[in-house]
Image (cartoon, rainbow, N blue to C red):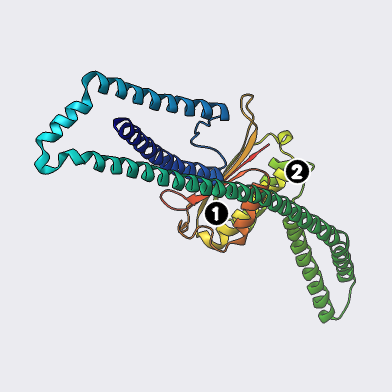
Amino acid sequence: MVIVMTFSCFLFFYNFHHYWHIHIKNNRHKIVVYLKIKYGRNYMMSPKLSPADKSNRGKIDLAVIMGASLLTYFVAGYFDLAERWINWAALGEFYQLDEIIFVLLVFSIGLMWFGRRRYIELQYTLKRNLEIKTKLEMQNADNAKLLLQNRALIKHITQVREAERNHLASELHDVFGQYLAAIDVNASVAIKYKTEDPKLQAILKTIQDSASFLRNVTRSQLRSLKPPGLETVGLSAAIEDLIGQWQMSFPDYEINIAIEVDDQLVDYDTALTIYRSLQEALTNITRHAEASSIHIDLITQNKSAQPNDISLTIRDNGIGFDPNEGMGNGLGLIGIRERVHALNGQFNLHPADPTGTVLALHIPL
């Protein structure tokens, strides 16, 4: 009876210990899977047992049980525990203490039943957690695949849009610009001819002014559609030209520029992304920021111990934005973010201190 009780108590505490151990471990496993899905890396690693280790652990547990049972047998025989129990129980006959052994027997069987039920529940919980883990891993793989496809699609759309812009710029320059130049020249020649009709002179002058105005508008649109000299003179010169043209249109802004760029390190796609991002940022500042000062930093990092990258930081002293609203419905900023992410870069937009907005881009080269 003592051996049965010892075995039952051991089985109960063993199962109880493993119940809580596996329960906590499973919760940690859920956290590990969640962090892996969200951030793409493991933050906690749990040791895994091989089949051989599991078999050895089972043999050790069985040996412990057998050892405890044998030890109980020898201790009970050496001290005559059964006789001592009978003598002690006889003293409490009034309280039926000699019958308590059957209560302990039922209690031991109950502990075995309790441990068995908890073991079955653990098996079911573990199986369900493994199924959840498998589903999460499959979902993570699908999400990663969709992300790569979306970035490839965004890159393709950007290339198609730039190709359409280049085609439209070529048409404006070769057709529209040439005919406007011809109209301007013809109007200038006609004005030089002497005529006694003052109305005709006024009409010719109006035609000439209109043609000159349209030529200036066309030239401005060409700069917007196709960055001038981005492939030939490099990113630095193209950025300086963009800022110069923008200052001519908005002379009231104070602009501080710091450009330290190695144009040989910057490929065309990265240079175009930087150019378009600055273009969109300046447009947003003039429309929404209500700023008076703008700081622009464009730097390439060329270090032997670290990968090369290029960073663009734009800061204004305007009214800023509400961080809770984020970028809102601004498709321009969303377009910048997606173009930067398509190049495996980093996009960061946050309020400046004390006022204004900071836009920071980092793109590997």
Say what amino acid the circle numbered 2 marks. Answer: Tyr
Q: According to the image, label 1 marks what residue?
A: 253
- The residue to which callout 2 is attached is 268
- The answer to whether residue 84 is left or right of residue 332 is left
User: What residue is shown at x 49% (from left), y 50% (from top)?
Assistant: 350
Which of pointers 2 and 1 indicates the residue nearer the eye? 2
Residue 201 visible? yes
Question: Closest to the observer: 186 or 331?
Answer: 331
Asked if the residue under mark 1 is in contact with the one under mark 2, i.e. CB atoms within 8 Å, the reply is: no
Locate residue 107, reporting x and y percent.
29, 43
Left or right, 74 with reference to 222: left
Q: Is residue 15 above or below residue 356?
A: above
Q: Is residue 244 visible?
A: no
Q: Quadrant of the C terminus?
A: top right
* Helix, strand or loop under label 2: helix
How far across and how far down the image is residue 174, in percent? 88, 59
Residue at 40%, 41% in the rendered image: 19
Q: Position of residue 364 (x, y in %)?
A: 65, 38
- Determine which quarter of the picture holds residue 260: top right
Above or below: residue 294 compared with residue 105: below
Q: Amino acid at mark 1?
A: Tyr
Give the camera-side residue of 93 and 112: 93
